Amino acid sequence: MWDGWVDFGIAVVVGIGVAIVVAVIATIVLAVVARRRRWAGVLSRQSRAPFRMLLLVVALWVAVRVAFPDETWRGILGQILTILIISASAWLLASLVVVATDVALGRYRIDVPDNRVARRIRTQTLVVRRLAIAIIVIIGIGAVLLTFDSVRAIGASVLASAGIASIVAGLAAQSVLANVFAGLQIVFSDALRVDDVVVADGEWGRVGEITLSYVVLDLWDDRRLVLPCTYFTTTPFENWTRKGSELLGAVEMDLDWNVSPALMRAHLRQVLERTDLWDGRTSVLQVTDAVAGYVRVRILVTAKDAPTLFDLRCLVREAMVAWVQESMPQALPVQRVLMTDAAAPAPRTSADPTPTGDGLFTGSAEAERRASTFTNAIPILRDDDAEPST
């Protein structure tokens, strides 16, 4: 009896020794490669623990299968170690996915001005990482359950009724699956990326995270807005950085008719030349409306991104208001009231001329002919017509 336990102990020691040797060799090789390749260092940090765990469990599993003296406990320990091997393998595969995505993300920086491609790659990579890890976990759990004979029997019966089960599961998880497919559609259609500036649900913010079920917006006032992925596939939203981060913004002012657009335009040029917020692309001042006693002046300026544009618009608005107050106070918006004597209205006599003139549908043969197309009336023949009307 003791000979069997001694053989088992020797098998365990030999297995652990082999595992240690393999782990040391792998560590040395990765350390050497890491001097020239960045991915080797990332692989060593992320996968060291699951790799060593897998080696240790495999060594114990081999020792139990080869030299464990008790037949009854050999099967139980073998199944436990098999479950641990499946778990360690899933852990190692998940770490390899993390390593691969981290290396890919390291090649695309998003802290640079022109980062549209980097943001697209980062968004797709992060979603693929989450999806791959979820698939690995699900497969690992299924593999663990299939190590039990009773679960295999249940699995066979479930497969026999897979049609009904799939329909029931599809109806029960309809909203969840809709969000998952919407998340995949968002990512791979390049409609939305991490770090995009968007306006959604009436809020302005930056995309902080995209998952398979929801999108997190980091709003400008440090709040977080969480929206389901289906929102971005069914509801229109504004993406301010779809093609680039540069934006055009407007500043509108209602002023009096005494304003001088030429002087305002000269002062605007001075304001923009003194600030670093303006990117130098566009500077336009136009009068876009002149009704209801006011002149509407619209100023268009450009900036490198949305936050800079917001500050630039505030700066221009404040500078122009101060300039109007100091240099052209007559241009400040005012309301005029005409005072008249209500007791003595202007007399109106029968000598007032009757309004005459040609209109669109009256006053001439052509106008009356045009009117007949809408009324089916017979045009009146006029003495000065060149030819009679029919």
Image (tube, rainbow, N blue to C red):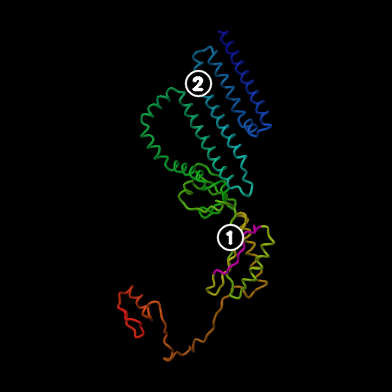
Q: Is residue 51 above or below residue 116?
A: above
- What is the crowding at mark 2: few (fewer than 14 residues within 10 Å), some, or many (at least 20)? some
Mark 1 → mark 2, Cα distance in angstroms = 67 Å
Q: Secondary structure at mark 2?
A: helix
Q: Nearer the viewer, residue 346 or 316?
A: 316
Check if residue 278 falls in the magenta segment.
yes
The amino acid on which the numbered mark 1 sits, given as a three-letter code, is Gly
Q: Is residue 160 above or below residue 222?
A: above
Q: Which corner quadrant holds the N terminus? A: top right
- What is the crowding at mark 1: few (fewer than 14 residues within 10 Å), some, or many (at least 20)? some
Position of residue 263 measured from the top left corner of the image (x, y, whole percent):
65, 71
Q: Nearer the viewer, residue 389 or 247?
A: 389
Q: Secondary structure at mark 1?
A: strand
Position of residue 51 measured from the top left corner of the image (x, y, whole percent):
59, 26
Q: Which residue is found at the position 51% from the left and 19% from the top? A: 78
* Residue of label 2: 79
Q: Which residue is found at the position 65% from the left and 62% from the top? A: 315
Check if residue 106 falls in the magenta segment.
no
Q: Which residue is found at the position 56% from the left and 9% from the top? A: 4
Position of residue 163 measured from the top left corner of the image (x, y, whole percent):
36, 34
**Quadrant hosting residue 317:** bottom right
The segment highlighted magenta reads: 277-288
Position of residue 334 measured from the top left corner of the image (x, y, whole percent):
58, 75
Q: Which label's residue is closer to the chain start, 1 or 2? A: 2
Residue contact at pointers 1 and 2, CB within 8 angstroms? no
Tell me if 139 is positioned left or right of 165 in this view.
Answer: right
* Residue of label 1: 249
Q: Which corner quadrant holds the C terminus? A: bottom left
